[in-house]
Image (cartoon, rainbow, N blue to C red):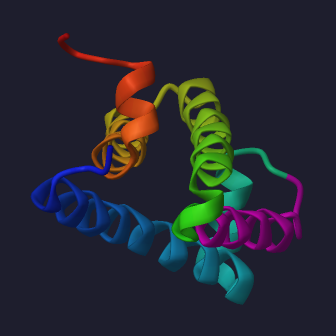
Amino acid sequence: MKPKAWQNKLGVIATGLVSVPFVMSAFMKIKGGPEMAEGWKHFGWPEGSQMMVGVLEILSVLIYMIPNTTFIGAILLTGYLGGAIATHLRMQEAVPLQVIFGIVIWGALYLRDERLRQLLPFRK
């Protein structure tokens, strides 16, 4: 059974909205610069590793945005967010934004895909 039209549209919109910040973040990491290097140093990450993290981030988003691979992309982005949460917690910084992004990633997928709604039904 396919999702209702409004569910699918809302899921597609949420997918796009949650993907934009990841894409922007990835390009900032790939581009680099003194601000990125300073932030990277603040978190204790090795110098120069932001390029690889940016590439992995953009690949995860692209996989998430392709309908046939969206489940794998959601898993990859969830893992990415887990690393971000761990990094921020280690620095004793707040993490609600990362948690919200994770909820929106899976919420968008929940709206778009009947298989996920069957797996995790809110009501019968």
Q: Is residue 84 left or right of residue 106?
A: right
| Residue 7: image location, x then y, percent | 17, 53
| Residue 56: image location, x then y, percent | 77, 64
Instruction: Give the magenta range.
Output: 46-63
- Identify which residue is drawn at 42% across, 69% down: 21
The total of numbered circles placed on residues is 0
| Residue 55: image location, x then y, percent | 78, 73
Whether the magenta-drawn stretch holds residue 61 is answered as: yes
Q: Where on the picture, by quarter, is residue 54?
A: bottom right
Looking at this view, name the residue that lies furthest to the top: 124
Magenta portion: prevailing SS class: helix
In-front residue for pair 80/51: 80
Q: Is residue 43 left or right of residue 64?
A: right
- Identify which residue is drawn at 31% across, 51% down: 2
Q: Say whether residue 114 is visible.
A: yes
Looking at this view, name the residue that lies furthest to the front: 1
Q: Say whether residue 95 is visible.
A: no
Compared to residue 51, the image places residue 57 above or below, namely above
